[in-house]
């Protein structure tokens, strides 16, 4: 489109030049030369200003288009970075949940072994005719297990409440399990 505008200006300048040459006298004198060169100079200046204006508008349009393209690309990069951040957070949260389950399983096993040991010792005391000490060991073991169970419930409830209070996380409860998976909300 821009090419047609420039070609039109060039053709117009050539047509005016040819018209002035045809209308000019056959013998060139200094006055005839001035009569021919002054209109050509003005036409050349007008066409030069016209071409400058066309090229300036073309340059501004190209800059505007590139800025728009850069803005789109920048926005695409920001969204990609935000998505990558959300994915990294989700992966880290999954890893934390996995490690905490493993740690809790190991701790539960150790507590279970300790409880079994206390019950075994209590049973030996009962068999060894030390009924009071045996019953004390068994009841202490039962109290420890009850306290451990109650503390575990409190910690789990506290974790669920803290997760619910975080704005960028939501809880997904599956079927009958109370298995919790942390997911980040995606912003539009």
Image (tube, grey):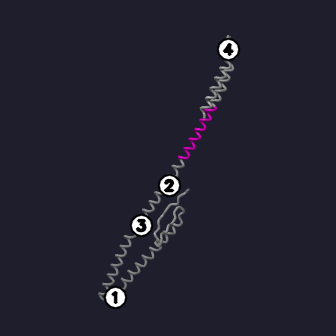
Q: Position of residue 124 (x, y in %)?
A: 30, 84
The reply, left or right, for residue 9 in relation to residue 150 is right
Instruction: Mark 3 vs mark 4: give the one in front.
Output: 4
Principal SS element in the magenta part?
helix
Residue wearing tag 4 = 33
> Along the line of sight, which residue is nearer the eye, 40 or 5?
5
Give the x, y percent position of residue 165.
Answer: 54, 66
Q: Secondary structure at mark 4?
A: helix
Tell me if label 3 and label 4 are in contact, CB under 8 Å. Answer: no
**Residue 100 has which mark?**
3
How far, Cα to Cα, is label 3 from label 2?
26 Å
Task: For marks 2 and 4, give the CA distance.
Answer: 73 Å
**Residue 20 placement (x, y as % from top left):** 68, 19
Instruction: Give the vertical position of 138 relative to 26 (above or below).
Output: below
- Is 185 situated above or below 76? below
Extreme residue in the left direction: 128
Circles 4, 1 touching at the beta carbon (< 8 Å): no
- Mark 3–mark 4 Cα distance, whole angstroms, equals 98 Å
Say what secondary structure mark 2 lies in: helix
Please name which of the two marks, 1 or 3, marks the residue nearer to the observer: 3
Mark 1 touches mark 2? (CB < 8 Å): no
Image quadrant assignment for residue 68? top right
Q: Is residue 111 left or right of residue 87?
A: left
Q: Read off the residue under disc 2.
A: 83
Marker disc for residue 131: 1
Q: Which residues are magenta?
A: 53-73
Which quarter of the picture shows residue 127?
bottom left
First of labels 3, 4 by sequence position: 4
């Amino acid at each position: 489109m821009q090419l047609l505008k420039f070609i039109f200006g060039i053709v117009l300048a050539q047509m005016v030049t040819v018209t002035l040459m045809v209308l000019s006298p056959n013998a060139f004198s200094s006055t005839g030369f001035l009569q021919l060169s002054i209109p050509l100079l003005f036409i050349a200046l007008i066409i030069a200003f016209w071409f400058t204006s066309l090229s300036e508008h073309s340059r501004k349009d190209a800059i505007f288009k590139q800025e728009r393209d850069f803005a789109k690309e920048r926005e695409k990069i920001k969204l990609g970075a935000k998505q990558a951040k959300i994915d990294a957070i989700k992966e880290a949260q999954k890893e934390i949940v996995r490690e905490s389950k493993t740690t809790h399983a190991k701790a539960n096993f150790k507590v279970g072994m300790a409880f079994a040991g206390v019950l075994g010792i209590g049973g030996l005391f009962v068999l060894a005719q030390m009924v009071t000490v045996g019953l004390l060991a068994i009841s202490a073991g039962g109290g420890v297990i009850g306290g451990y169970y109650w503390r575990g419930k409190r910690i789990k409830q506290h974790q669920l409440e803290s997760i619910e209070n975080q704005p960028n996380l939501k809880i997904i409860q599956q079927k009958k399990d109370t298995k919790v998976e942390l997911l980040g909300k995606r912003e539009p």
